[in-house]
Image (spheres, helix red, strand yellow):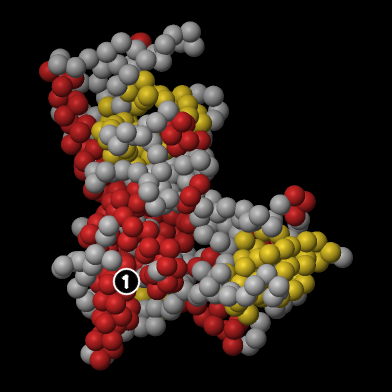
């Protein structure tokens, strides 16, 4: 996909080349804001193996049961236009075409429709200066090449860039140790519930074990219900926590956490609990307190010492997740209904052993707080993996990130959430030095910023990083135009296989 590009304000400067690694929501949001803000001719290449840009894992699903878990009024690609997505839905008459999205709490469209919205907004974002191209491929390696970068593709080709933006999003879930060997090929052990037709292997009367009790579990239950599933479901996680419901519309936020922010995880917990009590006395729901904490999250995170951040992640993160990331009302209703009629049981337990036996699957679970001698044994027909992303493996599991880490140009953040960056989202090398031409966007950068998972925060972060990059690009173009700096790595001096990949400056 190549979009229109008009005349540049620097006619004698070469086109600046930006490569975005990852074309899911984060990569698309960054590209949209960079294209809208640039004042310089820009070649913007987005490397993404999926057929559509902007969808990624979350919004690429075609399952009609998968809906956004935030009202459409809170989902916009343009922070300065909070109703941008809602207006897009109304223009398409989407609520009339899909009445199931209409809820007392707002509009909850299918996630695939939001993916279409992102793709269309990207297609409109050329701004006259940015030529946007979808490179449908994977990135095998990112190499420093003088002042520039060389991005080697899985197909064998390569791209040259003045700046690289890493927007790889969330890593894949880690495989549980018990799920190994022949079990990986079992026809009714679903390792990726997001894959097209993944749940087709589950029969209507199958007893199902879901490993995980968060938002993905809720989606799976909703999908199974839509398919007419009537069997029993057991959902298991270490704490057995379920995502909390939206309950009712929230008119505002309750509480102040950015003023004299907490210096410890315990003090923060006490302040949140106190705010919930005072909110309830004033007739406000606890969700209003969470909204205030989300609003102040970056200030709160920045104020905590490193050891307190680690303590918060270790002890409080699971409880934060289930209050912060709430299920879409249709999925919540599916979970509630299944529990009410006894078809769904939620257990706080860990998977100890799993094996195939007589056409079914035997599992052994250890209840939370019990010794290894106390086990619950179940025989089920299908197992579905619904655990969260393996953030600790975010660098090692991604070839592009791993290649940079191998030469010390990138390293994991201290909290194992993603990549270590500075406050401008510039990636820090092994010596702690930032690079203006290598940036991380979205969830990869949350070790520095804290709250960088919810869509509004990701969008705001993508826009902020794009603004920083646009300023850097304009400065670079000006130096080229003035002759103070000669571009390197242009088509007429790209090295051959026999040349050095570190050209003279």
Callout 1: helix, strand or loop? helix
Residue denoted by label 1: 266
* Residue 150 sits above or below residue 498 on the image: below
Residue 241 appears left or right of 350: left
Name the residue at 39% across, 83% down.
247
Q: Which quarter shows the C terminus?
A: top left
Q: Is residue 81 visible?
A: no
Q: Position of residue 440 (x, y in %)?
A: 34, 42
Residue at the limit of the structure toward the top, as seen here: 498
Residue 362 appears left or right of 26: right
Q: Which quarter shows the N terminus?
A: top left
Name the residue at 48% across, 35% down.
402
Location of residue 168 by image quarter = top left
Q: Nearer the viewer, residue 57 or 95?
A: 57
Q: Position of residue 229 (x, y in %)?
A: 68, 74
Location of residue 479 by image quarter = top left
Mark 1 surroundings within 10 Å by alpha-carbon count, few (fewer than 14), some (14 through 19), many (20 or more): some
Q: Nearer the viewer, residue 150 or 404?
A: 404
* Residue 270 sits above or below residue 471 on the image: below
Name the residue at 60% across, 78% down.
346
Q: Position of residue 420 (x, y in %)?
A: 35, 44
Q: Nearer the viewer, residue 185 or 96?
A: 185
* Residue 351 sits above or below residue 143 on the image: below
Name the residue at 24% across, 21% down.
14
Q: Position of residue 359 (x, y in %)?
A: 84, 64
Count the numbered circles shown.
Answer: 1
Residue at the limit of the structure toward the left, as seen here: 482
Q: Is residue 297 visible?
A: yes
Q: Nearer the viewer, residue 235 or 14?
A: 235
């Amino acid at each position: 996909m190549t979009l229109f590009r008009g005349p540049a304000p620097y006619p004698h400067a070469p086109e600046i080349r930006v490569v975005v690694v990852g074309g899911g929501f984060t990569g698309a949001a960054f590209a949209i804001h960079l294209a809208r803000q640039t004042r310089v001719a820009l070649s913007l290449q987005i490397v993404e193996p999926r057929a559509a840009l902007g969808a990624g894992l979350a919004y690429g699903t075609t399952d009609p049961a998968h809906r956004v878990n935030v009202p459409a009024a809170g989902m916009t690609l343009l922070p300065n236009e909070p109703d941008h997505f809602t207006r897009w839905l109304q223009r398409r008459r989407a609520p009339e075409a899909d009445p199931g999205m209409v809820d007392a709490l707002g509009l909850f469209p299918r996630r695939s429709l939001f993916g279409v919205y992102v793709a269309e907004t990207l297609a409109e974002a050329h701004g006259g200066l940015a030529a946007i191209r979808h490179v449908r491929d994977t990135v095998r390696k990112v190499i420093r090449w003088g002042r520039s970068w060389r991005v080697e593709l899985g197909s064998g080709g390569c791209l040259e860039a003045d700046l690289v933006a890493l927007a790889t999003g969330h890593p894949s879930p880690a495989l549980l140790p018990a799920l190994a060997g022949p079990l990986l090929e079992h026809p009714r052990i679903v390792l990726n519930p997001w894959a097209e037709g993944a749940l087709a292997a589950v029969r209507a009367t199958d007893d199902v074990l879901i490993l995980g009790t968060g938002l993905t579990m809720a989606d799976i239950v909703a999908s199974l219900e839509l398919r007419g599933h009537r069997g029993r479901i057991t959902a298991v996680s270490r704490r057995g926590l379920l995502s909390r419901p939206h309950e009712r519309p929230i008119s505002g936020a309750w509480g102040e956490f950015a003023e004299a922010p907490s210096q410890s995880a315990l003090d923060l917990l006490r302040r949140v609990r106190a705010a919930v009590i005072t909110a309830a006395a004033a007739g406000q729901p606890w969700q209003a307190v969470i909204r205030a904490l989300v609003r102040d999250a970056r200030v709160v995170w920045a104020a905590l010492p490193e050891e307190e951040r680690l303590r918060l992640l270790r002890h409080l993160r699971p409880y934060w997740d289930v209050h912060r990331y709430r299920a879409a009302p249709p999925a919540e209703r599916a979970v509630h209904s299944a529990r009410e009629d006894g078809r769904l049981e939620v257990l706080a337990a860990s998977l100890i052993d799993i094996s195939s036996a007589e056409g079914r699957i035997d599992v052994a679970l250890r209840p939370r707080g019990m010794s290894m001698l106390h086990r619950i044994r179940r025989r089920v027909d299908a197992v579905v993996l619904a655990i969260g992303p393996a953030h600790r493996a975010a660098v090692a599991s991604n070839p592009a990130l791993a290649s940079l880490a191998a030469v010390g140009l990138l390293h994991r953040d201290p909290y194992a959430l993603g990549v270590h960056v500075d406050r401008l989202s510039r990636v820090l090398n092994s010596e702690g030095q930032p690079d203006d031409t290598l940036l991380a966007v979205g969830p990869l950068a949350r070790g520095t910023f804290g709250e960088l998972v919810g869509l509004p925060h990701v969008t705001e972060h993508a826009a902020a990083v794009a603004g920083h990059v646009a300023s850097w690009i304009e400065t670079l173009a000006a130096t080229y135009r003035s002759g103070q700096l000669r571009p390197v790595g242009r088509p007429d001096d790209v090295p051959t296989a026999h040349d050095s990949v570190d050209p003279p400056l």
